[in-house]
Amino acid sequence: MQENKIIKLTVRDVRFPTSLEQHGSDAMHTDPDYSVAYVVLETDSDAALKGYGLTFTVGRGTEIVVCAVKALSTLVVGKTLKEIVSDFRGFYRLLSSDGQMRWVGPEKGVIQLATAAILNAVWDLWARVEGKPLWKLLVDMDPAKLISCIDFRYITDALTEQEALDILVKAKKGQKNREEQMLKEGYPAYTTSCAWLGYTDQQLTQLCSEALAQGWTKFKVKVGADLQDDIRRCSLIRKLIGPNNTLMIDANQRWDVNEAITWVTKLAEFHPLWIEEPTCPDDVLGHASISKALAPLGIGVATGEQVRLYIKHANAQHCIIRGPNALCLTICTG
Amino acid sequence: MQENKIIKLTVRDVRFPTSLEQHGSDAMHTDPDYSVAYVVLETDSDAALKGYGLTFTVGRGTEIVVCAVKALSTLVVGKTLKEIVSDFRGFYRLLSSDGQMRWVGPEKGVIQLATAAILNAVWDLWARVEGKPLWKLLVDMDPAKLISCIDFRYITDALTEQEALDILVKAKKGQKNREEQMLKEGYPAYTTSCAWLGYTDQQLTQLCSEALAQGWTKFKVKVGADLQDDIRRCSLIRKLIGPNNTLMIDANQRWDVNEAITWVTKLAEFHPLWIEEPTCPDDVLGHASISKALAPLGIGVATGEQVRLYIKHANAQHCIIRGPNALCLTICTG
């Protein structure tokens, strides 16, 4: 690998006026402008390779993340890709443990979103240098190398490095077949675009019908503002998609613990696969209580764009851990 | 009360080069420049009253908090103090639940520090309007009014509003005596200024002797970087202050759970009152495990400058809940 020294980091505040038509709206974010802090890493490589990374925001406040990326950039510019990827875990710790900046985190909120945008750009740069899409870089990587990129601080009570490595080594079996299948058939995904909270029933019907015609089989519906609305909308979508397609619901942190259990119980007849972010995202035990209460109804609990402590405490067999804003590995232990 | 309309908010990035002489140094913040984002609220009152508030930072990253205060200022400027204090809980929720900005929190990290600086300035303004120091404003306030200023979302599982109110009403008894005693004798405090991690044994001896001569009886020592150093320093301080004065230790989030228990056990002979921030500040259950393990040694666990979820889950009888950066009420239930 060339050294690929990072000689410049630029960051842009890019906003999209999605709130104008209520795209992206949910029970907690009623007028979101889906936006990004967008990072570009420039290198001194012969091919002038660049790495592109972003972190997702919903409008106001993106300028704060941009400010945080600029503050972190001094820890990045001047380093070579080679030295970063030779100790990716150390690089993560450098960004997240700066003796002064960690005070405004640590590893949470604005500074973590900024860290994520930079890390995503580094991963992208690495994949470009290897001439592969990122997923291919990851699946081709030696399991021990991949594990060495992850920070295991604070999660080792639930999953040791060795256990994580064993899981990855075991997963090597059948990998080739899975890759071929994915390249042929595409990869499983669900759509959230049919049922934002601010959409009318008419829009919902039209978008859902179009998505069905395009081959979608999994549909997520925003809930949590008004129970009667939720019942009407879930009923409508379940009728449209039929009993065999999958429905998920997402409350975007709207409820307290008991409220979540009561509310979701009243939506159980529509057989949602999971309720996503039912309550305060920091309340690990609250999520576990909700999971336990809803398990007999066959409804799971999904967390939002955060992962770390859930692995440790939240009875992983009850919680579906979803992708964080930062690229990280999710290893399900339950 | 006059309306006292807030017509301007200014915020300054104020830094102090404390790292030059290792003032403030600890196991995680080895070169802190103790600094602040400093907020001033200007009003249209006849007396041109202003409110002053700050949030504590340790150098780099303060500019991000300043940026966040500016982002929040649109929610503050134009409001009157009267309308804010008539629904202080609503004002907190307005600042912490803005449909776009909550995404970069919620209620954590940079945006929470920024919120704290603004809230502190509002409390200060309120006290100035009433012509009292803030503590006097609080103790004179009707308990029901005081409770109405607090946001009970997410903590009601552990403490209902009514229970909190009962505690405050009960505390009214003996208040007058306590006030008189405090005005006469001062209020209890401890000093952290004698034993920052970067200080030499000579500095430590000198500062500790001076503090003793000034009448200090409680001393906090930074620990967590090197066990042998900690043993030497704690031994030295315990000898200096004698068996009857109080020693506390503070690891500033340095350890994992098991490491914390092992390490502190080896310092038990110096009889610390508590170990502060032994591990990751988000790991509520980890703190509870440490508390439980250290209780037989007579050592408590103190959290850092955060409070909310600890009230809910962390077995309050084990945890000493300390003051957060934002002014809030700490009601010990255990």
Image (tube, coloured by chain):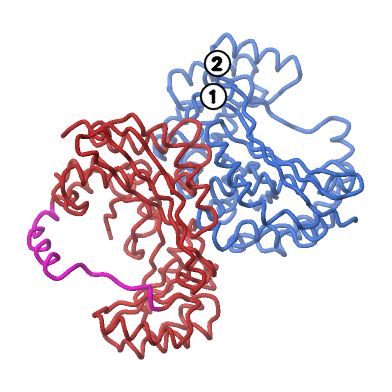
Chain colours: A blue, B red
Amino acid at dot 1: Ser
Considering every residue shown, the one lying at the far front of the view is B47
Q: Is residue B177 magenta?
A: yes
Q: Is residue B66 magenta?
A: no
Residue drawn at 29 percent across, 44 percent down: B51
With B163 as the anchor, is A168 left or right in this view?
Answer: right
Label 1 marks a residue whose chain is A
Which circle's residue, 2 or 1, is located before the other in the chain? Answer: 1
A229 vs A321: above or below: above
For the image, the number of numbered tags is 2
Q: Which residue is mark 2?
A: A199
Considering every residue shown, the one lying at the far top of the view is A202
Out of B177 and B114, give the one closest to the viewer.
B114
A183 vs B229: above or below: above
Q: Where are the magenta residues, as a range?
A: B170-194
Say what secondary structure mark 1 lies in: loop
Tags 2 and 1 both on a single chain: yes
Which mark is drawn over residue A25? 1
- The CA distance from mark 2 to mark 1 is 8 Å
| Residue B219 horizontal/vertical position (percent) | 34, 77
Residue drawn at 70 percent across, 59 percent down: A91
